[in-house]
Structures are given as structure tokens and as C-alpha cells.
Amino acid sequence: MPHLRWSTAGESHGPSLLALVDGVPAGLTLLANDIDRDLARRQRGYGRGGRMKIEHDVVRIEAGVRGGETLGSPIALRIENRDFANWQGRMGADPFATSPEPVRTPRPGHADLVGALKYDRTDLRDVLERASARETAARVAAGAVARRLLAACGVAVRSRVLSIGLVRDEGEYDPRGWVPEGEPGDRLEASSLRVLDAAAEAAMRAEILETSHAGDTLGGVLEVAAVGLVPGLGSYTQWDRRLDGRLAQAAMSVQAIKAVELGDGWAAASSRGSSVHDAIGRRDGAYTRATNRAGGLEGGVTNGEPVVLRAAMKPLSTLRRALGSVDVITHEPAPANTERSDVCAVPAAGVVLEAMVCLTLADALVEKLSGDSMRELLRNLEGYRAQLAGR
């Protein structure tokens, strides 16, 4: 069972989104502003749709925090859906005075049809409201809590866009340079697409604009990195404790993510071992690596190098130029349903992936160090680092 547990609730156009985070030690400084910063980052990015003009996501901490510090009890978070005001009579828990017009034509690539079959629904809105990527706002809120816990232990997590469509940032960047706050990290946050190379960003924007004019959508590849982790998080002793597997599952759970690699991943499969594995050295009383092709994980356990994860996001399945579909009531051919959507949400997906990585790493950290309070956890971390220094 996870040591840091969390869950979300809420529909895309319902009253609100909710997140519950349990297992955070007492005494962690946590303010709504810490969470709102990541919520705002999730809403930015060139290529986003009209929903971002309606929503201005802010969190209300409903439980688990007093006077700016966690209590050790479950933390309850609420994000209001402003668009709910426009959906009165079509969303909400009370019976409707008049039945809303059902959504009947599923979108290829979305959960619409499979969800309707699984849950025996004839109105696809019963599916798409929860399957919507709007749910990720609650994940980002929960992830921001985990980010605060990691930061207190000296760990930073950040994402960047590697490619959108066929346009790629070809630069090579050490995560120790772009993940922590500061330059060139400030450049990353200022970028409309969370790209480090300005020329690549300009080409990506042009590709998004052209795709928008065509009524189509674009995906891309993202990189998430974590720096400052101690060796020894995760375990090789059971399959479900391997941290690489836990990270991969967390990343693959994000809407539209279709592939994940850690370290060199796919490239390693076509290389010889001598050019894949990271030679071990020793300097200043600590083990070192000349490279980080393993992405900071060996045998499902962190080795002290930055953890590097990359994920492929498919183009979004809501197209203004709709694909063919079938009416689930009449079974006649019909164009797929068109919901308000984005042309490209790759930068936003990076912020969601950060949240999932933060939650997974924070769980592994609490698992390793234990501690009901931050003072106890940090004391355990200091003792573990002293133990490592003598090895």
C-alpha cells in the first residue's frame, strides 16, 4: 500500500474538482499560493483552447492544514469550476427538470465509446465529463503538495518540451542546469511552450498555427527530471516496489500519454552494452557516474543521478474537422462529437507529468525515511546521508 495516498473526484463541467492527499507528515509549510502556482502553469501554453479563458484555477484548502502547516491528517483540496455556471440544468447531482440532449457520437481515440459500453450509459457525457483532461487540475493540486515535501528534502522537479509534431529541440541540456529554479529555468517558465531553445519554439508555434487552421491537433514528446534525490529510493525485492515501474505507470495514467521511457530507453535497445551503461567512479567520498543513460535508476532503485523520464503525448482526440463515428442510439454513421478543446496541450501535459512524478517520488521518499512529522523525517534523511557518506 502506498505511504502517500491520494485520489481525485469531480467532472469537467461539474461544480468543482476535489483532491485528497493522505500521508503527508505534520509540520510541512503549505500555502494555497504554493498550489496555485502550479495550477496557473498548467493553464498556460500556446495552442490552448477557450476553456482556459473561462477558468482561473485557484485552490481552497478545506482540511489537513492549520496556520500554514500540515497536521499529519488528510489534506482536502477544492478547485471551483467556473464554467459550471454555464451548465446549470445539464450538470449537477439533482434531477433535471428537462432531460439534456445526450451526446451520441463517440470520438475516436477518446474514452467515450469504451466508457459507455463499460458503464452501460447511452449519454456519452456521463463518460467524457470524468475522462476529460480537466481532471488533471486536481492531480496538479495534489502534486503541488508532494512538490513542497520534496523541496523540503532538497529535491526539485521540472518538465520541458522536447518536440511538438515533427519539430524538435535538438539541444542537449544537463537537468542539473534547467531543473532547479533560476537560469535557464526562468527562460523555461517564460517560454510559451516550455522549450529551452528559442528557435525551436518559434518553429513549434508555426506548426501549431498551421494545424489549427487545418482543424487538426498535435502531440509531442516531454521530458521530466528530478534532481537532488538520494540513492536508495524504491526496491528490487518485489515487482511493484520498483520505482521505474511506479513512475512509468504514473506517467502512463495521464490522458493522451501513449509511451514512456526512462533514461535512454528506446535508444538503449539498439546499442551495445558498453555504450549504454554508466561507468562508476569515486570522488570526494561519494560514488559518481560519468554519464546518466540509466536515467537515475538501476534495478528499480535511485542511484543519486537525476531521474529522467520522457513521455510521448498523442494528438488530442477532439478535432474541429471531425472523424467518422457511429450514433450509439441509432447505430447510423455520423461525425464524431466535437467538444471545446485545444489544438496542442503538450506544455500543460508536462506540468501534469511533473505532478505525477512528484507524487510518486514523494511516496518513495516517505517509504524510505518514514516519520510522522517533518522534523522526524528530516532527521532520518540527515542520518541516512551520513550513512551514505561512510560507504
Image (cartoon, helix red, strand yellow):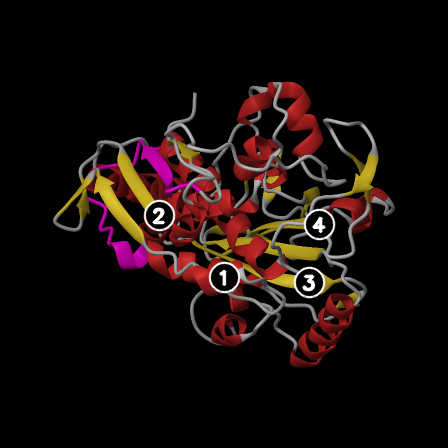
Q: Position of residue 146 (x, y in %)?
A: 37, 44
**Considering only order in the chain, which callout, 3 or 1, is on the residue closer to the N terminus?**
1
Residue corresponding to mark 1: 52
Among the two numbered marks 4 and 3 on one chain, the one whose residue lies closer to the N terminus: 3
Residue 312 badge: 4
Label 3 Cα neighbours within 10 Å, binned few <14 / some 14-19 / many ≥20: many
> Could you tell whether 303 is left or right of 73 in the image?
right
Q: Residue lying furthest left in this view?
A: 67
For the point 61% across and 73% down, the residue is 196
Q: Is residue 250 visible?
A: no
Q: Quadrant of the N terminus?
A: top left
Q: In the image, 270: left or right of 288?
A: right
Residue 132: quarter of image: top right
The correct choice, above or below, for 359 with respect to 307 in the image is above
Relative to residue 226, is residue 383 drawn left or right? left
SS for tag 3? Answer: strand
Q: Are marks 1 and 4 in contact (CB under 8 Å)?
A: no
Mark 3: amino acid: Leu
Q: Nearer the viewer, residue 275 or 370?
A: 370
